[in-house]
Image (cartoon, rainbow, N blue to C red):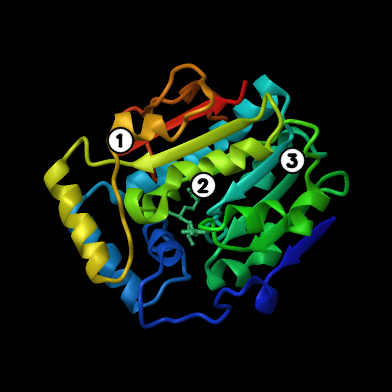
Amino acid sequence: MSDSRGGADSGLPTTIDTTVASEARVYDYWLGGRDNYPADRALGEEVAALIPGIRTMARANRAFVWRAVRYAIAEQGITQFLDIGTGIPTARNTHEVAQELDPSARIVYVDKDPVVLAHARALMGSTPQGRTAYIHADLHDPVSILTDPILTGTLDFDRPIALMLISVMIYFRDDEDDPRTIIERLLAALPPGSLIALSHPTGDFDPRAMAHVERAAEQAGLTFVARSRAEVETLFAGTDLVEPGVVSVVDWRPDLLDRPMPGFDPSTDTAWVWAGVGRKP
Ligand SMILES: C[S@@+](CC[C@H](N)C(=O)[O-])C[C@H]1O[C@@H](n2cnc3c(N)ncnc32)[C@H](O)[C@@H]1O
C-alpha cells in the first residue's frame, strides 16, 4: 500500500527550475543518474575538480544507507523508517533494502525537491504486507512533517522508528537553520529504542578543498556546510551512539554490506563523510 502528499498543500514549489542547481540533482549527477541539467552538471563538475573522489563519496554514502537499514532490521528489530532528504530514486532505495529483509517494513520518505516529488511513484512501490509513503515537505519545518496525516497514518509511533538523515544536514547552517533543534524535535516525537542514522560530508580530510566547495555551492545558490567529526557527533545529542561511533562512512559496520556497490571499492576508496547511528534511550 502506498500514499503520497505533494502539490499545493505542501506550499513548496512543485515545478522544476532547471536554471539553478538543486541539491538532489547535483547528487544524482555524481551517482550517474539522468535527472540533472546543465546548471547541476556545472556545479557537479566544479566540485569534482576540487574533490576528485566525489563520485566515490556519493556511492559510499548510498552503501551506508543500505547498511544502516540492515542494522535497524537485523540487529534492532526496527521495521519502520522515516527517511528525510530521500533524494532522487536510485539503485536500492530504503524501502527496497528494508522490505527485502522484512516484507512488512513501513517507510515514509520526505524531500523538498520537485524532481523527487516527480519520482515519488518509484519510491512508493511496496510489498503487499508493507507500506511506503512520500511527503513533499521541508525539513526546516519538522512539525509539519511530524503532524502530517500521511506520516501518522503510515508509521506506528508506539513502536521504534529509524530516522534516516543521510547527507541532508549539510544544507543547514548552525546560526540560521538551527539543525540541532530540528533533530531534537524529531527525536522527541519518536519512542524509546528509536534510531537516528546520519551521514555528513566533512572538511576534516582536506579543509582547503572543502572550503572551496562551500564557496562554489554558495555561488550556485546552495547552502553547503561541511562539519568536523566533533560537530557531527553533536548532531546525535540525546542518543547513545552505537558501535563504532561516528567514523568514516566507509568504516561504519562494513560487515553489513550484503552486496557490492557498483563503482565503489570499500577496501581502497576513501570518502570524506562521517557517519554514525544513535539509539534513543
Ligand atoms: C545529497 S542528497 C541525499 C540523498 C539520500 N539521502 C542519500 O544519501 O543518498 C540530499 C537530499 O536532501 C534533500 N533536501 C535538502 N534540503 C532539504 C530540506 N530542507 N527538506 C527536505 N529535503 C531536503 C535534497 O532535495 C536531496 O534530495
Pointers 3 and 2 in contact (C-beta within 8 Å): no
Q: How many marks?
A: 3
Q: Which residue is mark 1?
A: 269
How many neighbours does mark 2 have within 10 angstroms: few (below 14), some (14-19), or many (20 or more)?
Answer: some
**Residue at position x 25%, y 65% from top?**
218
**Residue at position x 66%, y 29% from top?**
194
Quadrant in which the C terminus is drawn: top right
Query: Visible in this render: residue 243?
Result: yes
Q: What label sits on residue 182 in the rendered view?
A: 2
Q: Earlier in the sequence, mark 3 or mark 1?
A: 3
Which residue type carries mark 3?
Gln
Query: Which is more foreground, mark 3 or mark 1?
Result: 3
* Occupied quadrant, residue 46: bottom left
Which residue type carries mark 1?
Asp
- The residue closer to the viewer here, 67 or 192, is 192
Q: Is mark 1 within 8 Å of ligand 1?
A: no
Which residue type carries mark 2?
Ile
Q: Secondary structure at mark 2?
A: helix
Q: What label sits on residue 21 in the rendered view?
A: none
**In this rendering, would 76 be left or right of 65?**
right
**In this rendering, would 213 be left or right of 101?**
left
Gap in Å between the C-alphas at discs 3 and 2?
28 Å
Please identify the residue farthest to the top as the structure is shown: 243
Gap in Å between the C-alphas at discs 2 and 1?
32 Å
Q: Secondary structure at mark 3?
A: helix
Q: Earlier in the sequence, mark 3 or mark 2?
A: 3
Expressed as whole percent of the image width and height from the top left, the position of residue 277 reads 51, 28
Expressed as whole percent of the image width and height from the top left, the position of residue 254 reads 46, 24
Gap in Å between the C-alphas at discs 3 and 1?
29 Å
Q: Which residue is mark 3?
A: 99
Query: Which is more foreground, mark 2 or mark 1?
Result: 2
